[in-house]
Image (cartoon, coloured by chain):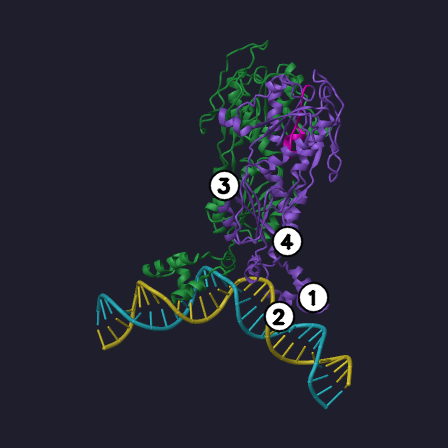
Chain colours: A purple, B green, C cyan, D yellow
Amino acid sequence: MTPRPNLTHIAKALGVSVATVSNALSGKGRVSEEMARVIRDKAKELGYIPSLAGRALSTGRSHVLGLVLADIGHPLFPQFAQAIEHAASTAGYGVLIGDSRGDIQAQTRAINRLVERGADGIVVVPRHGTRIADIGHPIAVIDSPSTPGNTVSADHWNGGAQIGAHLSSLDHRSIAIIGLHPDSNVQNDRVGGIKSALPEEAHVELLWIDELEDKHGPGCELGLLPFVEKGVTAFAAVSDLHALRAVTELQRRGVSIPGDVSVTGFDDLIWAGVIAPTLTTVRMNMARIAEIAVADLIRQVEGAPAQSDGQGVPMQLIIRQSSGPAPSGPAGNRSGGGPRPATNKTNGPILENTTREGSDQTC
Amino acid sequence: MTPRPNLTHIAKALGVSVATVSNALSGKGRVSEEMARVIRDKAKELGYIPSLAGRALSTGRSHVLGLVLADIGHPLFPQFAQAIEHAASTAGYGVLIGDSRGDIQAQTRAINRLVERGADGIVVVPRHGTRIADIGHPIAVIDSPSTPGNTVSADHWNGGAQIGAHLSSLDHRSIAIIGLHPDSNVQNDRVGGIKSALPEEAHVELLWIDELEDKHGPGCELGLLPFVEKGVTAFAAVSDLHALRAVTELQRRGVSIPGDVSVTGFDDLIWAGVIAPTLTTVRMNMARIAEIAVADLIRQVEGAPAQSDGQGVPMQLIIRQSSGPAPSGPAGNRSGGGPRPATNKTNGPILENTTREGSDQTC
DNA sequence: GCATGCTGGTTAAACGTTTAATCTCCTCGA
DNA sequence: TCGAGGAGATTAAACGTTTAACCAGCATGC
């Protein structure tokens, strides 16, 4: 089998110098249009593929980006990886993954390993509560607009506000918000956003799963039934994973969704569209976020300073079956302080699955 | 800021040649033990990190592996990525990800892109029904023992058999198996395994979700209630995602799990342990699979031939709340053809969440 | 008719590593 | 005393690319 062709092969075959070939293919030096054409043709004919190693050695750029997700086990990882890979590869970069196995220390180690491996820059989705040390290398942080040093991220607050507005417009006035951990900026933003869009008179309770699990062990029930009995008509979870937990727990206790209570999530994870009832949620614009992060990274690689603190990309509300009007129970169906419009930098919500609760159609 | 130190710096600082330094650090040439020590110390002192680019150019090896998952959006991807990354990085390799966006054509393109990027070898988890063309480069295929060209994978048949044996031991005699697509070797293995461990007199039905969705649109209900009415007491899904779908659909229709029917899944996906009821499932030994795949790849990179067709790594049954004894209904509780033991190459099942159905404990 | 400047190209060095070939002592055996 | 051989180091080439510096023609302006 023949070794893969390089600049020298092309140059020899055409009787020109390697420099000319290099210039012609990169379009940089001074080469006649005619010569350039001939060279390009020959390159294609021979199936020339530039050696990244050679180029890297010469330029000092590997054209590889590192991707470090604090919690690689997170169900959102595939979406991130896919979006970053796409954005990077469009820009001519490869993506090297680094794993920190959920460990905070390991996060820094993972970043370092990638740098040592020659990554030109790193995309980090940090573990909540972590501050990324300045590594002396281009870095893009995707966390939350309220995290200092954040480069770009979804506008979680705004996403929360859309959920809040949605529930509010359905006349829910007693709402429980389910979060995992109060240290996470992302989650706090989401919670804050939800609250911000509810009328002042609304009653809000907060549940942190980590606290419950510390007490009762991982995978424990959340004990949502008492809340329902106390009049809560909607559970707004800060992630679809928790929403799922809520949905199954409630259904198991015989609570009808969305007949008795509504449940909403966050992130549009894989199961959101296939469970029964399908889940109302809010989705990040991953593609856009990845584009911005990668673009900023590449700017940095080329010498520009890091982006000033980070834009928030609007989220997209997706209304499915799990949210419906609050039951007109004892709490009354007052119509004061009606639905607030979501902040205006968002698109309208997507309405999916028009099949409503109670329809008995099979599929 | 100082440029990162290289062999020349060390050599100069010590008044020796670069070759000696290289030899000392790699332990290859002939260097006195004393000299080697001095060089290693100096290298550490200067914080020397070898340039992968230089090494790659010189040796023709990039020490990077490519990972291409046909369906990068699959919830199993994080586990794969994590395991492969760990195995590779332990062996001194980095992992470059390639995305095929679920498209079969793109799968080959993705593989090629990674090869062009200089990956020494590729790990592929192909889309069902795909045959990986010989790419002229080291490749490791993780699919199913019954796929020709498979390098290593979980023993899906055995996993199915464990599920089958488990259900059988709980006296289920009318079982519906839920799959996605009949073209997948993995799924067929799982289905076959389940059937193989059921007594001959058991009644088995097969449901393919893709066929249902073709008819009724994506995200449609599966219409499981009629099965229950016909006497089915257990639904064995070929993935936790489908199991989840079944659980929510059944619960919504007021069917109690595992009181009325049992539901089992596959893969121990993220939600399996936190939904209510927690899901009985079967888990791959990802770490082991990744190790074998990476080891084989490295052997190939070093010139050895590809592994002969692939070993199956045993799966691990995890018994949780969603499976229980068949209700002693009209079908009777015959105790003939009792529980078959699972095939003997497996460990015993893991029993989690001893809290049983009906316990009202909050968490 | 000659300095000037542009065009299209070449030469050569550089990036950091590995490795085959070579060179210099030194010791040992005959 | 001399050749052989081995230990410990050096020299130099090679990997494939980029890029600064240089050079030969050729038209231009005066």
Give the distance between the C-alpha atoms of the residues marked 2 and 1, in whole angstroms. Answer: 13 Å
Question: Which contiguous range is marked in magenta?
Answer: A260-274
Residue occupying image coordinates x 70% and y 68%: A35
- Indicate whether residue B114 is drawn in magenta: no
- For label 4, the residue is A92
Looking at the image, residue B344 lies above or below residue A16: above
- For label 3, the residue is A104
- For label 1, the residue is A36
Q: Earlier in the sequence, mark 2 or mark 1?
A: 2
**Label 1: how many residues lie within 10 Å, few (<14), some (14-19) or many (20+)?**
many
* Dots 4 and 2 on the same chain: yes
The percent position of residue A233, horizontal first and vertical second, equals 67, 21
The percent position of residue C4, horizontal first and vertical second, equals 70, 81
Q: Can residue B358 be seen in this view?
A: yes
Q: Nearer the viewer, mark 2 or mark 3?
A: 3
* Dots 3 and 4 on the same chain: yes
- For label 2, the residue is A17
Q: Which amino acid does label 2 sit on?
A: Ser
The percent position of residue B58, horizontal first and vertical second, equals 50, 60
Q: What element carries label 1?
A: helix
Q: Earlier in the sequence, mark 1 or mark 4?
A: 1
Q: Specify the subunit that label 3 lies on.
A: A
